[in-house]
Image (cartoon, coloured by chain):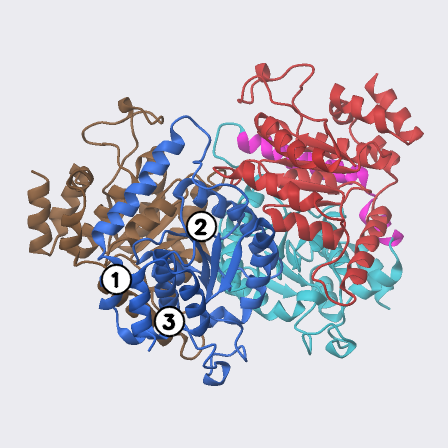
Chain colours: A brown, B blue, C cyan, D red
Amino acid sequence: MKIALLNEFSQAWKNDIVLRELKDVVEPMGHTVYNTAMAKPLVAQDVPEAYTEENPRLTYLHLGIQACLLLNSGAADFIVTGCGTGQGAMMALNAFPGVVCGYCIEPSDAYLFLQINNGNALSIPYAKGFGWGAELNIHTIFEKAFGSPKGMGYPNEPGRKESQNRNAALLNEMKAAAGKPVLEGLKAIDPALVKGALTQRFLDCFYEGCKCDELRAFVEEMAK
Amino acid sequence: MKIALLNEFSQAWKNDIVLRELKDVVEPMGHTVYNTAMAKPLVAQDVPEAYTEENPRLTYLHLGIQACLLLNSGAADFIVTGCGTGQGAMMALNAFPGVVCGYCIEPSDAYLFLQINNGNALSIPYAKGFGWGAELNIHTIFEKAFGSPKGMGYPNEPGRKESQNRNAALLNEMKAAAGKPVLEGLKAIDPALVKGALTQRFLDCFYEGCKCDELRAFVEEMAK
Amino acid sequence: MKIALLNEFSQAWKNDIVLRELKDVVEPMGHTVYNTAMAKPLVAQDVPEAYTEENPRLTYLHLGIQACLLLNSGAADFIVTGCGTGQGAMMALNAFPGVVCGYCIEPSDAYLFLQINNGNALSIPYAKGFGWGAELNIHTIFEKAFGSPKGMGYPNEPGRKESQNRNAALLNEMKAAAGKPVLEGLKAIDPALVKGALTQRFLDCFYEGCKCDELRAFVEEMAK
Amino acid sequence: MKIALLNEFSQAWKNDIVLRELKDVVEPMGHTVYNTAMAKPLVAQDVPEAYTEENPRLTYLHLGIQACLLLNSGAADFIVTGCGTGQGAMMALNAFPGVVCGYCIEPSDAYLFLQINNGNALSIPYAKGFGWGAELNIHTIFEKAFGSPKGMGYPNEPGRKESQNRNAALLNEMKAAAGKPVLEGLKAIDPALVKGALTQRFLDCFYEGCKCDELRAFVEEMAK
């Protein structure tokens, strides 16, 4: 599975911690990790000097656009994201069809979300409650998110899995109905916002794995 | 403020607890509570005998439709929702433009979401972690959600509020761009799903407060 | 390592869940589990008919006495306990010299306690917050408690481990100074309370592993 | 009620935050707050230059001694304490008769502990999980700890209060039996440790409120 980690500016200085814990857990399982949004900035403060052309300032809005492109093109199979509380990233991702993003404070949140809701993205708080033990907590979150097949339903009772999978499928349909087709939606967004999301590390991951000619053409055009 | 409580079938047997705690907290503040989705069913099991015409079986998908109609029509100003983990309800609500739904496990989640993300809906788990103290926890969640003006930013640092409000506004724009116009989106959804969401208590609240002729006409047509 | 599970009456009807999760985690590690206090009673209500001679009604006070005898005699190396909130059991255990009992709501609590405080007992809430996911939570708590050597210090900074181990040792000394010698303390407690703690499954575990002649003689005398 | 706040060295640089939140909550209720252990040190690092004669380096062991003297002499009615995880402080306090210290991560922990266990001390983690929202969390913890009469029992079911109060009283008896009399226990502890706990702000609070001649004489002797 291709897993992309997406951090925004406010907690980007913790990107190296999250990336390390994610790789520690999922690489031995055979998954590949891409770090497509922000890496650790030059300084922890939100000042222009913190950012470079290779590591520009991204907000949770950019993360939503990256996730939409990565998941809908097949360039990534799963997104790990978050922000200060994780709520902004969670909502920005859920704004798009094809993205099913849960919110996760502790390990059993992750497990239950993947069993019940069968999603393809997780948003985590990287400032709220982030003190001693936070790196242990996200390590264990990753263990419980990726340590077993998803979509099995919970709790283990007759009919529960089928009912939960049905609702998960219906949610995808309802989102597809309420939203525009992916490409049409992306074209309706402020182009400056879309262009801002197309950083070099994102493009490397996207071009490597994109299986959708339309989305590839769109990204090539916007990245010019 | 008009606050609507939306419960689905799996945790509907706790609707009376949530409704009581919500009213206890917000009525003294001058808010009005509507209980528009499921009330406590006749039996706690998910069997046909649990439900009645007045209290039919609703899933989190129906909650999304109710929230969309209530918030976009002005019939409600805020939605309190949830399900077993709260993730399904959160995603179903966030599928729609005009709905900004946070996820909330404990009181400071609610406070931070309202200060940072300035949303109009909260989803809460009513089975996950719901043991001794759960009614205290949701009581305090409501105190912290509704006890102070929202959108003030967090933490209290220069520029933080402005930056966070700007991102919250941009998220609304991005969602509006990615999604269809509200009415068009609703018309694209399986009509059986929409009709299923239009229960009597929902209609009472909707008709009482709806300020949008188009949405009213749509609901009247679908509720026939 | 010999690990004893100690449940009291109020949450004893969950003993089978806790016991199963504990065994699932620690038996593959080579540890042995003893279930020395309450097993699942005949009915969930706290009525005389719930209890039998083999499974009498025990409170957290009895758990403190059992833990004191098991740990100070060498019959057990570690205690897993708890009650409705886990606070009563935690305090009853900490009343005794030789018992170092932490409190644990989620997995990183367990890990940090064992790394920093190097204890030999953990108390867990079995009613507070005990809803969907609770069995996953205690499973993961046991993984993090027993999955690595304890007393390594936290966070991983120069001098931290030494400083924390020193304080843990000094706490044992201070408790030994403030308390009576173990046997003298046990003799000063209401004999009816002590006798009540000496149930058959406790005695089986105690006699099997006790390495202290004085404590064995005391128990034999009290159990007559 | 006289409430004493007790911080040790590792999290003392947060003492001003905790003190502010505690006063904000309890002074309007008519309670008086004493800050008897560590105040904010000169620098956040644990180096000799951080500390002064007025604000010496105290560990959780010293906090246990302070709490024992304050509660058993009547100089304080309640203790708020903690350390990195809060476990060390909790165990150091519970080492002494007359001190009934609960552990508290979030607001309902505090409420349940005071209703069920009727204690006189609370230990809180000031590093574990201490990120965005931490000051809100401790504020709400204090609201729920001190906002209603304690010892009322939980949940509200027939006989629950009586049973819980009985066990709380029996715990006090069992601790008194297992421990030495307070003064005897204090005299058995390493005098250097006791002397180290007798800082100026502690002495001010102790002498102001001490109602026990024996303990006063002991402190006067040790503080020489």
The mark closer to the camera, 1 or 3, is 1
- Which residue shows up at 61% across the image and 51% down it? B28
Q: Of residues C35 and B154, which is closer to you in this image? A: B154
**Residue designated by label 2:** A105
Q: Distance between the Cα atoms at labels 1 and 2?
A: 35 Å
Chain hosting mark 2: A
Determine if marks 3 and 2 fall on one subunit: no
* Residue A50 in the figure: left or right of residue B150: left
Classify 10 Å Cα crowding around label 3: few (below 14), some (14-19), many (20 and above). Answer: many
Chain name for mark 3: B
User: Three-letter amino acid code at disc 2?
Assistant: Ile
The local secondary structure at tag 3 comes to helix
Tell me residue A203's x, y (percent).
14, 42
Horizontal side of residue D155 vs C161, given as left or right: right
Left or right, C46 with respect to B218, comes to right
Give the residue drawn at x 27%, y 24%: A48
Residue B94 within the segment the image draws in magenta: no
Tell me which segment is drawn in magenta.
C160-188
Residue C177 lies in the magenta-colored region: yes
**Residue behind mark 3:** B197
